[in-house]
Image (spheres, grey):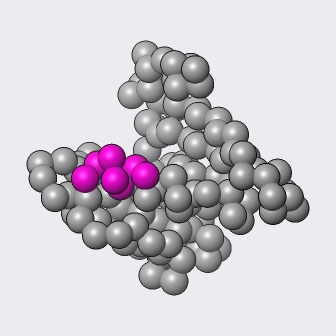
Amino acid sequence: MLTGELGAGKTTLTRGLGEGLGIRGAVTSPTFVIARVHPPLGDGPPLVHVDAYRLAGGLDDMEDLDLDVSLPESVIVVEWGEGKVEELTDDRLQVVVHRAVGDTTDEVRHVTLTGLGERWATVDLGALSA
C-alpha cells in the first residue's frame, strides 16, 4: 500500500518495482482505469497496479476489482489505498513516501516501510535504511 502526497513518487516507485520484477510493458499511472495488470516476462509474479484515489466507497469499491483473487500469486501495489484496502489481507507492506510539500526544487524523498501481519513479522526492514 503506497501513501504519499501528489508528486511524491508513488508511480515512479511502482515503475522500479515493475522493472525489478521483470514485467512486460511500461508501468503508467492507472488513475483513469483504476487497475492495470502487468504480466511477467518470465516465471515471476504479475504486478497489479491500482490507483484507489477516485474510489470513495472504500473496501466495497475495491472488492469489485477482485484483488483478493490475485493476492496469493501477484504483487499488488495500491496507491492511495489507506483507509480502503486494509481489510483485503492481514499481511501487507505499508510504504509512505514523504516529500517536502511546496518545494519543487527538492527531489529528496524519505520512505517509511511498515510490515504488518505474519508475513512481515521476521523481516528486518531496517536493513533497507542503511
The verdict on residue 21 being magenta is: yes
Q: Front-most of 114 and 118?
A: 114
**39 relative position to 93: left or right:** left
Residue 13 point in image, percent of width and height: 51, 53
**84 relative position to 26: left or right:** right
Residue at the limit of the structure toward the right, as seen here: 102
| Picture quarter with the C terminus | top right
Q: What residue is shown at x 12% (from left), y 53% (from top)?
A: 42
Q: Front-most of 61 and 44?
A: 44
Q: Quadrant of residue 36?
A: bottom left
Residue 97 point in image, percent of width and height: 66, 47
Q: Is residue 34 above or below residue 68?
A: below
Q: What residue is shown at x 71% (from left), y 65% (from top)?
A: 6
Q: What residue is shown at x 35% (from left), y 61% (from top)?
A: 48
Q: Is residue 5 visible?
A: yes
Prevailing SS of the magenta stretch: helix
Q: Is residue 84 visible?
A: no
Q: Front-most of 23 and 66?
A: 23
**100 relative position to 23: left or right:** right
Residue 49 point in image, percent of width and height: 42, 63
Residue 38 point in image, percent of width and height: 29, 65
Q: Quadrant of residue 26?
A: bottom left
Q: What residue is shown at x 50% (from left), y 72% (from top)?
A: 29
Residue at the limit of the structure toward the front, as seen here: 105
The verdict on residue 94 being magenta is: no
Residue range highlighted in magenta: 16-22
Residue at the limit of the structure toward the bottom, as seen here: 32
Q: Front-most of 128 and 108?
A: 108
Q: Is residue 76 above or below residue 114?
A: below
